[in-house]
Amino acid sequence: MLFVIIGRDSRDSVELRPKHRPAHLAHLDKIDQAGRLVLAGPLTDGVGSLIIVDAESAAQVWADVAADPYVQNGVFQDVEVHPFLRVFPKDG
């Protein structure tokens, strides 16, 4: 099942993001290595980040969120998780 994670940046994110980026990317790499990361990246208007993961449950996604260095170190002021239905592109 797919889930969208929206991390909204805190006021201190410009200062904090570069400091915690390597650990955040390592965290995402673990999810990717497990074959669960669909896509991830910052929103270019500076609001935050978008991550789409494949997970068995919302609880698994919230565990991923809790382990994210951007959450643990205040880069994200809040996080939303939503189940997502992919319609396009259609699978081969």
Image (cartoon, helix red, strand yellow):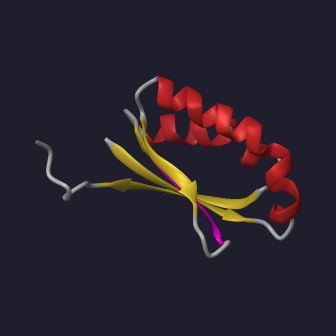
Q: Residue at x 57, y 31 (%)?
A: 29
Report whether residue 5 is seen.
yes
| Image quadrant in which you'd find residue 38 | top left
In the displayed structure, would residue 32 be above or below residue 71? above
- The quadrant of the picture occupied by the C terminus is top left
Q: Check the image and name the residue furthest to the bottom.
A: 45
In the displayed structure, would residue 55 be above or below residue 82? above
Is residue 51 rendered magenta in the image? yes
Would residue 82 be found to the left or right of residue 16 on screen? Answer: left
Would residue 92 be found to the left or right of residue 27 on screen? Answer: left
From the viewer's side, name the closer residue of 26 and 75: 26
From the viewer's side, name the closer residue of 16 and 68: 16
Q: Residue at x 89, y 60 (%)?
A: 15
Q: Residue at x 64, y 33 (%)?
A: 27
User: Which segment is the magenta one?
Assistant: 47-52
| Residue 83 in picture, x, y percent from top left | 37, 53
